[in-house]
Image: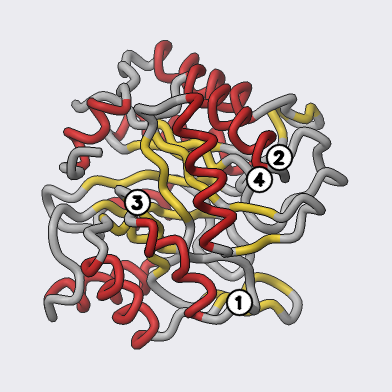
Amino acid sequence: MSKLIITAAICGAEVTKEHNPAVPYTVEEIAAEAEKAHKAGASIIHLHVRNDDGTPTQSKERFAQCIDAINIKCPDVIIQPSTGGATGMSADERLQPIELSPEMASLDCGTCNFGGDEIFINTENMIIDFAAKMQKYNVMPELECFDKGMIDMALRLIKKGHISGHLHFNFVMGVNGGIGAEPRDFLFMKESIPEGATFTVSGIGRAAFPIVALSIISGGHVRVGFEDNIYLSKGVLAKSNAELVEKVVRLATELGREVASPSEAREILQLRAK
């Protein structure tokens, strides 16, 4: 079994300081959270960026500022910008950080109801266009799948040649409108991807750490962070993303799984050299 890759999704687009005062907004706050999460054991930083007032943005300039600041503090970490952005953003807006040619980026593989009137739109043509731009800038996609049908969409596009190279999925589980986070749901997703593909699991809210444990013992990888869950345990707010990463490391240690460094994560994911 390979070493465990831990991704820290340090701020997301929706969670605010009103939910947890430790959620980072500014360039300095984002870089500090990334550094703490990396030191705790995260080899990948899944990156959304905010304006100083906390509003989400996909500005290429803001991403560049945050990436530069993170690289100063932890130059070996893998930075994975989001192309999901926030609901209501246009495709062109969401794609901006790809022009910075990061090693990896998220590629959402379908449309999902996010509750109320919020719809996270990713049509087939959008996915094809996003994949093409990632290929143009030599960016490895992490295939974000909120349900089994999104895996099927990704597999169809792989077969048609729109997505190539090593396949790495992220099962986002427990989202309103997506697949649940029961063990049967996890196994359904895990058994639906091709042999040789790797996967990460992101459990939302209360699903975070049960899914972490399942992925650790099943040979998968894990994502935690304020984007997905702001609590260390029931009713206890995490003081930093690092606390969530540290809990993963403790679980991995108890379950006999070593944690990957960034260089080891690059080897597992077959990433290009930074």
Marks 4 & 1, CB-CB < 8 Å contact: no
Labels 2 and 3: the sequence-earlier one: 2
Q: Nearer the viewer, mark 1 or mark 3?
A: 3
Say which residue label 2 marks. 24
Decide if residue 116 is on the left or right side of residue 75.
right
- The residue positioned 20% from the left and 43% from the top of the image is 271
Labels 4 and 3: the sequence-earlier one: 3
The amino acid type, in three-letter code, at marker 2 is: Pro
Say which residue label 1 marks. 89
Decide if residue 212 is on the left or right side of residue 29.
left
Marks 1 & 3, CB-CB < 8 Å contact: no
- The residue positioned 37% from the left and 71% from the top of the image is 150
Q: Quadrant for the C terminus, please.
A: top left
Say which residue label 3 marks. 102
- The residue positioned 49% from the left and 18% from the top of the image is 39
Labels 2 and 4: the sequence-earlier one: 2
Labels 4 and 1: the sequence-earlier one: 1
Q: Nearer the viewer, mark 4 or mark 3?
A: 3
Q: Of helix, strand and loop, which one carries label 3?
A: loop
